[in-house]
Amino acid sequence: MAKNLVIVESPTKAKTIKNFLSKDFLIKSSFGHIRDLPKKKLGVDIENNFIPFYEIPADKTRLVKELKKFAKESDIVWLASDEDREGEAISWHLAETLKLKESKTKRIVFHEITKTAILDAINNPRKIDKKLVDAQQARRVLDRLVGFELSPVLWKKIKPSLSAGRVQSVAVRLIVEREKEINSFKATSSYKISAIFKKDSLAKQTNNNEIKAELLQRFNTKDQASEFLKKCISANFFIKNIEKKSTKKSPAPPFITSTLQQEASRKLGFSVSKTMLIAQQLYESGKITYMRTDSVNLSNLALSMAKKEITKNYGAKYVNIHKYLTKIKGAQEAHEAIRPTYINNHYAGKDDNQKKLYALIWKRTIASQMSQALLEKTNVTIEASSVKENFLAKGEILKFDGFLKVYIESDNTGNDIQNKMLPPVTIGDKLISKEINAIEKFTQHQPRYTEATLVKKMEELGIGRPSTYAPTISTIQKRGYIVNETREGITRSYNYITLINDKIKKEIKTENTGYEKFKLFPTDIGIVVNGFLVEHFKNILDYNFTASIEKEFDDIEQGKKIWNKTISEFYKPFHKQIEDTLKISEKISGEKLLGKDPETGEKIIARIGRFGPLVQIGENKDDKKPKFASLRKGQSIETITTEEALNLFKLPRTVGKYEENEIITAIGRFGPYVKHKSNFYSLTKNDDPMTISEQRAIEIIEEKKEKNRKKIIKEFEENENVKILNGKWGAYISFKRKNYKIPKDKDPKTLTLSECLKITKETSKNKKTSGPYKKK
C-alpha cells in the first residue's frame, strides 16, 4: 500500500497529477463534495447557532467507505482540492467525514497542475483554513435558509413548484427590469446626413480617393433634411481644416473568470456554463491555470516566459512587460489570472472547443505583455458654401501594430483600422460631392442582456463571485424564469433622401429591426415572481444589499466576522418578513385585463395558470365557466394585445382530413401540435398552428410515422409492453416506460420475448449505484 494518499475532487485532475508523483503516492478522487445539506430537509439548526447538519448522499457511501480504508492504510493524507472557498470546504468535509487525524493530514494548494507546482505544494503544505471554510458555510447556509423559507411562500401565493434564491432572484430582477425599460421605450427618429466627396483635381477617380463624411448635427424632421439637401445643390465644398493626432492603444489585461466568459461568448459563441466546463477540462489536464479567479496578476515566472516568447516570435520592440492591478473589490491578488501553464505552447486541447478556448487564453496572455499600438487619427472638416453646417471625415492609420499583431478584443475596431485611411488632402482643396444622403434613423432601446453581459453587470454591482456566475445563470434558466433564445425582428419603413447630380430623390425603404440573437428574456412566471418578491422582499432583492452580503462573506474569510453571527443578523428580520407575507390572503397571478370580448361582452384576462401563462374569456360563475387558451411562444402577458388574445381562441382549428379522420391543430402544455386519430404530432418552430395547411400537416404526420417505423426493431403480439427499439446509442429494450441495455453478445433482431423479460428482470435486480461512483 502507498504511504501517501492524495485526494482531489475530479478523476481528470487525479489522472494528471499521477504523472508527476512517485509510486509512493496513491491518487484518488472525491468526485466533488462527499457530503452536503440534505436535499429534502432544511438541515440547519436555527435554534442552535445555525449549525448545519451534513449528510453523505447515497451515491457516495461506497466511495467514502473506500476512502476511509485508503486513509487508514496511509501514513499521510494529502488534501489537494481547489484553492478557493469551495475547494477548502471539500477538504474540510473529507477531513471530518474520514475522521482524519490532524497529525497525518496535510492540505496542499496550487493554481496550476504542473510538476513544479505540485512538488512545490507538497514541500509547502498547510492546515485547512477554517476561515475559508466558514465563508463557504455561511454562503451555503444563508442560501439554504432563503430558498427553504421563500420558496413555500411562492407556492402559496403564486403557484406550486416555484423556487427562489438569494443571488438568482436578483439576477432575474436585472433581466425583468431591462425588459420593462424596453417595453416602455418609444423610438424617435432623426435624419443623419452622410456624404461621399472626391477631389476636384483628380482626373481618375477610384474608391481609394473618396472621402466619406458626416454632418456634425442631425435634423429632426424630413422637411428639415430635405431643405438642407436643396441648399447643397450647386454648392461648393472645401477642406476647411485638417487635424492630426497620434494616439496609443493599450492591450487588455489577462483573463479573469468574468472577462473570459464575456470574450468566449462574443468570439466563440460559447455559453457561460460551456466556457467554464471547457476551462475546467483545460485546467484539470494541466493546460491552463485555475479558471475561477478575479485577479489579473501574473507570476514573475509567467512574465519571464511571456517576454521570452514575444521576443522569439515578434521581436524585442513588441515586448512591454508589466503587471496589472485588479480593480475588483475583494479580489485575491495572491492568485493568478487565467493563463497557459506553459506559454511556449501555442496550441493545446483534445477537441476543437478546448483548442479554441486555449488559443483565446494564449493570445490574451501574450498580448497583455506586448507594446501599445500606435495610431494616427485624422479629422478633416469640410465646409459648404451654401450652408453653415460642416461635414466631418475621419481617418485612422496604424503606425505600429504592437499587441494588435496577436489579439484584438471583440468590441475593438482594430480590424478596420487600415480601411479608414483618407486620401491626401490639404486645407483649401476643392471637393465635388458624389452623393449626399439623408437617412432616417431611429433611437435604440438598451440592449437585452446576453449571458456574458449579465455576468459583466453582476460583477459591476458586486453580486456573486467567479465561482457563482455560471451556476446562477444556469439556475434561473432551469427554473423557467428566463429563456435564452433568438427572436426574429420586424420590418420597419424609413425615409431615404439622396442628392446626386443636383437632383433629389425620395424613397421609402425597409429594414429589419428588433432581431435578437441569443438574448435573455424574462418569462411571464419570471416577471410575476420578480414583481411579488420586489414588493414583499425589496431588501433581499436590493442590489446594494446583495453586494453587501458578498462583502460579509469576504470579511468572514479574512477573519473579521463570525459566520453564524452574520447569519443570525440576516435571518431574524428575514423570517419576520416571511411570516408577515404569509398573512396576506390574496393569491398573485399577474392578472392583466385586456378588454372585453366583442361577441359576449365578457372580460378578457391574461394571467398565470397552473401550467403557465394563459388568456381567459369570462370568469367563474354558477351558470357557466370561462374559456381558456395558452399563450404561444414569444407572447407575454405584459405585451399581448386584445386582438392577439382573441386569435388564440380560434384554436383548436380543423385543418382538413386525412385517412377519413379530421386533422386538428392546437396549442398544449408542450407547445403547438397536430392531432390525428388520437395521436399528437409536435409542430416545428417554423409551423404556425393558425395558418398551417392540410398538406403540411399530413407531411408532419407521415414524417413522425416514418421515424417511428425506423425506430421499431421488433414488437411482440403476446406482450405489447415489450419493444426492441433503435435509439441514439443503439438498440435497447423498452418495457413499461423504462429502457434496458441489450448485452453486447445478443443480436437485437433475434431476441425472444422471454429473453427480453429476463434481461429486464436481471438489470433491475443488479442495478448499479447511480452517480459518478459506481460499484465495480
Image (cartoon, rainbow, N blue to C red):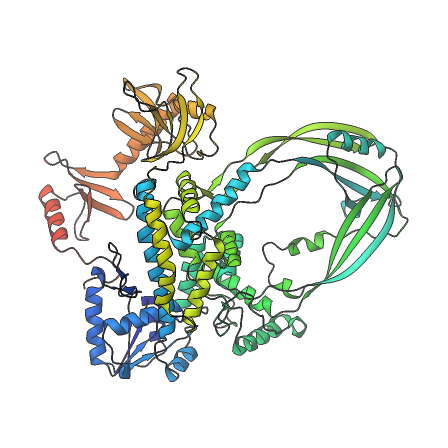
Q: Is residue 676 among what the camera can see?
A: yes
Q: Residue at x 41, y 24 (%)?
A: 604
- Is residue 352 in view from this perspective? no
* Residue 128 rendering spot, x and y as whole percentages: 34, 76
Q: Residue 220 occupies which quadrant of the picture?
A: top right
**Nearest the camera: 58 or 281?**
58
Q: Position of residue 623 (x, y in %)?
A: 28, 18
- Number of numbered callouts drawn: 0
Q: Where 617 falls versus 434 (above or below)?
A: above
Q: Quadrant of residue 27?
A: bottom left
- Name the spot of residue 759 as percent of width and height, x first: 13, 49
In this rendering, is residue 676 above or below 413?
above
In this view, the residue in front, 314 or 287, is 287
Q: Residue at x 31, y 24 (%)?
A: 620
Task: Report whether 196 appears left or right of 160.
Answer: right
Quarter of the image where the C terminus is located: bottom left
**Of all residues shown, which one is farthest toward the top?**
599
Task: Where is residue 14? Give x, y as percent.
Answer: 33, 71
Residue visible at 38% across and 59% down? 570
Residue 637 shown left or right of residue 259 in the figure: left
> The N terminus is located in which quarter?
bottom left
- Relative to the observer, which residue lies in front, 619 or 504? 619
Image height check: is 656 above or below 297?
Answer: above
